[in-house]
Image: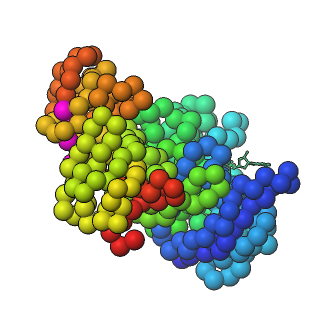
Amino acid sequence: MAELSLQHLDKIYDNKVQAVFDFNMDVKDGELIVLVGPSGCGKSTTLRMVAGLEDISRGHLLLNGRDITQTPAKDRDMAMVFQNYALYAHMTIYENMAFSLTMRKEDKNVIHKKVMAAAEILDLTAQLNKKPSQLSGGQRQRVAMGRSIVRNPSVFLFDEPLSNLDAKLRGATRREILLLHKRLGATMLYVTHDQTEALTLADRIVCMSMGHVQQIGTPMELYDRPANTFVAGFIGLPPMNFYHVRVEGGLLKGEGFEVPLTEEERATLSDRNNREIILGVRPEDMAEGGTVPVDVTNNENLGMNTLVHGYIGGRHDLHIVAKLRGWKEYRPGDGVKLQFTRKHFFDPETTNAIRKED
Ligand code: ADP
């Protein structure tokens, strides 16, 4: 059982760089939380503050209601799995996994039971007598996880654990982490810059930018109801398209195009009439047959879908990417008219989403 409470955490490094601002979140027992954002946004710093590897400059950290802000890392009952899984080359896989328990001088039989159980969970039973050099990258990553599992920590912390793996292995290891999470039911904090990992792994995502939390929510919430243009542009691939448009009654007017609004969209934008907003449209929320004229520059067939790149109304500053269902064969220079089947609206001043209830 492990509930974490991160209360108004700030991190200011010695060189006065503030890496994290007012990080505030309660993590429920057994939740898998993914911290995502571009490089340098403060994800690792936050994780390291939780681990106790960095001092917390301001704020409080609670584990099951107990304040552990000042507790040394080794006494926090957490295990961190790093991106470069340094294994001891001269030891067998068994010895690597047993290492921390051996250091603590635990009973040999107890160690054996724990290592065998972890190996079973991680499908490493047949590898236990081998040396790390005889294992694949993915297996070595699992050994690194095994070293954490044998300690039976309250909280698992993952810092970009998949970034050393090739694309195929990343997918497979991601699914293993999900299974592991299900089997152990443990509370996990997982850091990545990869939005796909966030969407596929998380119970809840924390999306960060420049030290600030932008939004906390389920993958569905961040995808479907992004709080601002940052989250909207970061979550989803290819990224959302953004355009400055004017609200004019039942229409949105952009440079070189206009699109009609549904009744519901009109209601959402009722107090924005004759004002400028930012329109966001995901590539997958477009279809052929509409009012937006596009000059095609590229046609990429993905099998089930086709990515069509182009410019709106011939304007080279209005790039558009559409993900159209089916196999299309547009050529550079072709024209196509597109419709937007779902639209997102943002305030140009604050960049925050405009919603009906606002
Ligand atoms: P992320 O994990 O999102 O890539 P980090 O948490 O590593 O980001 O870094 C956040 C910010 O803090 C960056 O601007 C980084 O340069 C800065 N930073 C990280 N570690 C230190 C440190 N030890 N001393 C000073 N600044 C640091």
Residue 53: quarter of image:
bottom right
Quadrant containing the C terminus is: bottom left
Residue at 27% over, 38% down: 257
Residue lying farthest left? 289
Asked if residue 358 lies in the magenta stretch, the reply is no
In the image, residue 140 lies at what x, y percent?
56, 40
Vertical placement of 21 versus 317: above or below? below
Please provide the residue range marked out in magenta.
337-341
Q: Nearer the viewer, residue 286 or 196?
A: 286
Residue at 18% over, 21% down: 329
Residue at 56% over, 35% down: 164
In the image, residue 314 lies at what x, y percent?
31, 24
Vertical placement of 24 versus 189: above or below? below
Compared across the picture, whether 309 is left or right of 62 comes to left
Quadrant containing the N terminus is: bottom right
Tell me how many marks there are.
0
Vertical placement of 215 versus 15: above or below? below
Q: Is residue 230 visible?
A: yes
In the image, residue 131 lies at what x, y percent?
61, 36
Type of colouring: rainbow
Compared across the picture, whether 35 is left or right of 103 comes to left
Q: Nearer the viewer, residue 142 or 294?
A: 294
Residue 213: quarter of image:
bottom right
Q: Is residue 181 visible?
A: no
Residue 3: quarter of image:
bottom right
Compared across the picture, whether 159 is left or right of 323 comes to right
Residue at 52% over, 58% down: 350
Please identify the dominant SS of the magenta region.
strand
Asked if residue 340 lies in the magenta stretch, the reply is yes
